[in-house]
Image (tube, grey):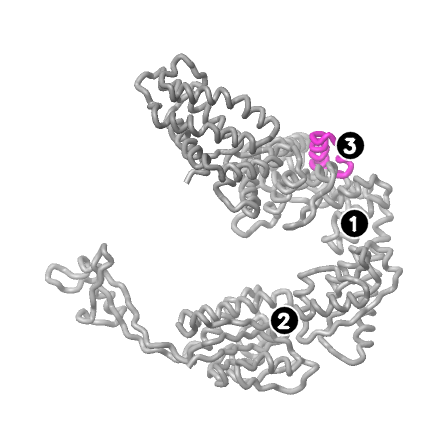
Amino acid sequence: MKRTLLVELLTEELPPKALERLSTVFANEVLTALREQELTGEDSLCTPFATPRRLALTITNVASQQADRVIERKGPAVAAGVDIEGKPSKALEGFMRGAGVTFEQLQRSNDNKTEYFVARLEKKGQPLDVYLANIITQALKKLPVPKLMRWGDSDHQFVRPVHGLIMLHGDRIVPGEVLGLQSDRLTSGHRFLHTGAMQVVSADSYEETMTNGKVIASFEKRRTRIDEYIKAKAHALNARINPSDSLLDEVTALVEWSAIYVGEFEEEYLEVPQECLILTMQQNQKYFPLLNNNGKLLNKFLIVSNMQVDNPKHIIGGNQRVVRPRLADARFFFNQDRKQTLESRVAKLGNVVYHNKLGTQLQRVERITTLAGAIAHQLNAEKSVAELAARLAKADLTTDMVGEFPELQGIMGRYYALHDSENPVVADAIAAHYHPRFAGDSLPQGAIACAVALADKLDTLVGIYGIGLIPTGDKDPFGLRRHALGVLRILIETPLNLPLDTLLKLCKDGFINQTHSSTGILSLFLKDFAWDSVVADVHGFMLERLRGYLRERVSSSKVIEAVVCQNPTRLDLVMPRLEAVCVFGTLPEAEALAAANKRIQNILKKTATIKTTIQPELLQEDAEQNLYEVVQSLTPQVEAGMQKQDYNSVLILLASARTAVDEFFDKVMVMAEDPAVRNNRLALLKRLGDLMNQVADISKLAT
């Protein structure tokens, strides 16, 4: 009989940041194991539940017993399974022992290649009760838990002590033991809003039973409820919340039955930059700060409480008392930090180690300053302004505020620079040079900010790559993938006419110059570096990131490879080239020209040296003379189109050469016996291939 299965572990408070992940993995592991035992069907639905004090799941249409099965085990080939006398070989005897069958019980099968022995074993279906406890035990062992704990006098381990176990199939208790607990149908409701144990009558009534006990068992439903409530409360106050999915997830994992209350703090704290106040309320207190319609912080915040009471004044008052010292600390840090200028803090970076093989933060700032100035010069921006912004960019790392909240680096630097009466362009560049910090984040605005941001990211890439700390698998402790993507986005989306190879060379030169002028740690570790190899490796690494970036925007991997395989350095031209190739791919001539281009490349690969000069007098066939004339005619037009970066026009021009190209390959033998004629035809193909691949390597479009 198929019924809904319920499993619940009643625990002490689970780690909130990991709760949703624990729940999902637990549910998936149990469902997978039941499927392997053929106890569920394709129509079985698994629903995970998670609250601070429980992990649970329901799975519909779970069978009470497996169906009887015939298990087929493949044995040795018949030719190798018996000797000349027809007796079993040693290999076949071992197979029979393992399968528990006799020679007479074996059957033969053929897969159209080999005839082999088969043991077909009838296995009687086992009840769910035989498997369930072990399935749950094994699923718990696979949870992503970094640290386990014991409780009481038992040797059982889990992320938190477990006090109850429910295993129900329909309305029947499935007997079994997990973590030393026998299965039952008893559970607990809300710790404060419901007293006494509750009985779960059946698996299908679990969610309703929990609701009656003032527990919203579904993490997703609880999250949606909180989200709707806080938005409604903010709207009623003519305000809006500062959005934070991570905070919403965390408060969802902290409560079983949510209530939303409004707290306040003194307006005098609003003199502190609102980023500081927002961060301390969200990070330390799990509050939702309120903003007005212009995005300015109000002296109000929303509290997500696990208690729903008629008079919440004590809850609100307690939270207001707790938040004030945090806000006072932020104000103290802000006032203390402003007593020193950013410029006076730069020298202190010499006491901060950036990396034991790459020197101090001060040495890094010196490299970034030089590189930012060089990039600004390339962009026709004020070199001195970029150098000043780069010099001050890391100074806020020595402030009390950033020491308390590292997330505010750059942001506080901007506030302190403005307080020091620095150029607003410099202040904005200090804040923006960390951008983009994550996928979809905003980009630096203006040449100065872009110069400092590029310098910062390139220095990290070349330096960390240089000392061999290359990302592997999912390990990227220095965020090189993020830095590479940041460089790509700035160059492509701004866009900026800055060749990537030029930027990497400038960055490399900064390391070399600093190494030669240093007698300390930099000279020790970096003096013998093969910098050209490092730059080539970083360039390759960034092109791989470019492929990933483009895959989110262009569906055809062939189109992407046609552009990226040419190792582009002007990344601001990549998207226009891609768009042109996409349009070209829709033309009726595209497939034939791509195939012809591929054929040209294959022919040229087999020839060691090819003369590039075409001798018209050696063109014997009408088809090759016609192709030569087409190439001669198209060359200046293609060069003009490339000069104007009109890639669509260039590819449309090339499409007009299809007839001449097809005729050439149909009527002309390229590898003629006469060496002079052969070399002349190869030179013509070389010229044609170079012409066709100006925008992209269109041979990559060939099927």
Observer-nearest of 308 and 470: 308
Spatial separation of the CA atoms under disc 1 and disc 2: 38 Å
* Range of magenta residues: 366-391
| x and y percentages locating residue 568 in the rendered image | 56, 34
Magenta stretch: helix, strand or loop mostly: helix
Q: Which quadrant, please, contains the C terminus? A: top left
Q: Is residue 470 visible?
A: no
Question: Residue 595 sits in which quadrant?
Answer: top left
State the quadrant of the N terminus: bottom left
Circle nearer the viewer, 2 or 3: 2
Which quarter of the figure has residue 642? Answer: top right
Q: Is residue 146 above or below residue 168?
A: above
Q: Earlier in the sequence, mark 1 or mark 3?
A: 3
Q: CA distance from mark 2 to mark 3?
A: 55 Å
Residue nearest the observer in this picture, 144 or 29? 29
Mark 2 lies on residue: 221
Q: Which amino acid is tagged 2?
A: Lys
Residue drawn where x is 48% and y is 26% of the image: 690
Q: Secondary structure at mark 1?
A: helix
Q: Are marks 1 and 2 in contact (CB under 8 Å)?
A: no
**Dot 1 amino acid type:** Met
